[in-house]
Amino acid sequence: MTLPVLPLNNSNLAQLALEICIKVNEILKGRMNNAGTFTLAANTTTTVVSDNLYQSDQAVHWVPTTANAAGAMSNLYVSSRVNGSFTLTHSSTATTDRVFLYSRLG
């Protein structure tokens, strides 16, 4: 679920209060619109993760979801960051199931 940004020029205070309540409730349910998944590319040493909401000053935290992904953790790091994407450097293997969940904060 993608949460829309609150308008800064809302003259209807009741509507604005309702929108704030909805967003706070979604955050309390754990839906902060700051997560995604990626799979490390096979037979190469870099993977670009595109995320329109990613900002280059945000921290990225990932969790492996497969045994092969867990095995890749010791040689996986963020090597480049730009608004809209980050690049991961990792070992080159033919494995195609190195799948991770990630969140971005900042």
Image (tube, rainbow, N blue to C red):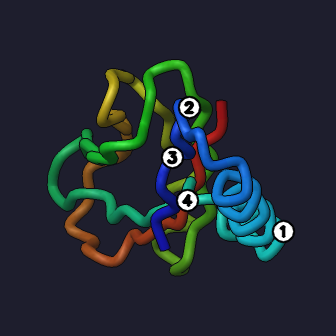
Q: Residue at x 22, y 57 (%)?
A: 41
Q: The residue tagged with tag 4: helix, strand or loop?
A: loop
**Residue 26 in the image: above or below residue 88:** below
Task: Determine which of the numbered discs, if any, sits on residue 28 in the image.
Answer: 1
Q: The residue tagged with tag 1: helix, strand or loop?
A: helix
Residue underneath mark 3: 5
Cα separation between marks 2 and 3 = 9 Å
Quarter of the image holding residue 45? top left
Earlier in the chain: of badge 2 and badge 1, it is 2
Q: Could you tell me the amino acid type at mark 3? A: Val
Q: Residues within 10 Å of mark 1 (few under 14, many from 20)?
A: few
Q: Could you tell me the amino acid type at mark 2? A: Leu
Asked whether, in this view, residue 58 is left or right of residue 83, the answer is right
Q: Residue at x 64, y 59 (%)?
A: 15
Q: Are marks 2 and 1 in contact (CB under 8 Å)?
A: no
Q: Are marks 3 and 1 in contact (CB under 8 Å)?
A: no
Residue 76 in the image: x percent, y percent?
Answer: 49, 42
Cα separation between marks 3 and 1 = 17 Å
Q: Residue at x 59, y 39 (%)?
A: 11
Residue 79 in the image: x percent, y percent?
Answer: 40, 24
Between 84 and 81, the residue placed more toward the observer is 84
Cα separation between marks 4 and 2 = 20 Å
Cα separation between marks 2 and 1 = 22 Å
Residue underneath mark 4: 33
Residue underneath mark 2: 8
Between 18 and 39, the residue placed more toward the observer is 18
Cα separation between marks 3 and 4 = 11 Å
